[in-house]
Structures are given as structure tokens and as C-alpha cells.
Amino acid sequence: MLARLAAETRTLVLFEAPHRIADTLTDLAQSFGTERAAVVTRELTKMHESVYRGTLGQLAELAREDADLARGEITLVIAGANVERAIGGDTELLARALRLLLAELPPARAAAIAAQICGVKRSEAYEMAMRLQRD
């Protein structure tokens, strides 16, 4: 599931149990990359509210060192992948979408729809659509 979310270009909001936060941040750093920007919040809207900002790698390390980070209700906010990374990680989804759409639509229209679905540039989707039609 994390591998599929790694290419998501929208911001992700996750709720995690305090006893799993260190392992979750380590897994996220491995799947999304250690440089992905993120925020860990504890006890939002409460007296002991805390906000930790950094990269997934930094936050994973902090979670292993700071016992306070693993207390209370935890919300993770993770920046979406940039589009260039998403196309690299989601080429298979783009190809599948294009194959389905090309069966029903002209290449330009299929590419426009697939680009919106996959969060890639229309020109990249059109280029792949033309390759798929040739093959």
C-alpha cells in the first residue's frame, strides 16, 4: 500500500497509534524517500499540542530518540510527491489507464484524461499513448 501512495501527488493525512509511530515513520521514509517533507502533530487542539516538522528521515530518527513524540493522538501530514517522481513511480498506472481509454477514445482525448488521473503532463501521456498505439 505504501508503494502505491509514494507516487501520490496530493498531500497525505494519516492518523497513527503512538506505539507504532517510530516504525511507521521508518517505513514511510523507506517507501517515500527520506527527503519527503512531513509534519508529525500530537494532541492537536489540546493543552499539550506539539508539532514536529522535517523530512521523513529526520522525523523517523527523532521518533526513535524522543519518547514524547510517541504519546497522545498522532496525525501525520506528508507532502505529495512531485509530478516528476510520480511519473517515474506510476508509469504502470498510466499505461493501464491509456490502454483502457484508447479502446474507446482518440489518442489526444485518452491522453488528456489519463494525464488528469495519473497527475502527469498531458504531453507525457500523449507520447505514451502514441507508443502504445504503435505497439
Image (tube, rainbow, N blue to C red):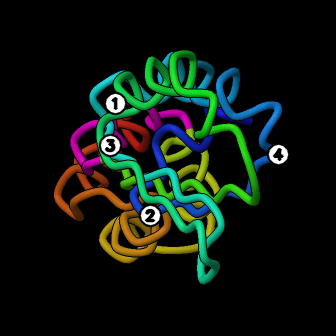
Which image quadrant: the N terminus? top right
Please tell me which of labels 4 and 3 falls first in the chain: 4
Q: Which residue is mark 2?
A: 11
Label 4 vs label 3: CA separation?
42 Å
Percent from the top left, x then y, of residue 11? Answer: 44, 64
- Say which residue appears at 45% left-offset and 58% top-offset: 118
Label 3 vs label 1: CA separation?
13 Å
Percent from the top left, x then y, of residue 81? Answer: 35, 47
Q: Which residue is mark 3?
A: 128
Of helix, strand and loop, which one carries label 2? loop
Label 2 vs label 4: CA separation?
20 Å
- Say which residue appears at 58% left-offset and 29% top-offset: 25
Of helix, strand and loop, which one carries label 3? helix
Most foreground residue, 34 or 42: 42
Most foreground residue, 71 or 103: 71
Which residue range is magenta in the image?
A: 82-92
How dense is the environment of label 1, judged by Cα within 10 Å: few (below 14), some, or many (20 and up)?
few
Q: Amino acid at mark 1?
A: Gly
Please tell me which of labels 1 and 2 falls first in the chain: 2
Residue 86 falls within the magenta-colored stretch: yes
Label 3 vs label 2: CA separation?
26 Å
Disc sitting over residue 17 in the figure: 4
Please tell me which of labels 3 and 1 falls first in the chain: 1
Please tell me which of labels 3 and 2 falls first in the chain: 2
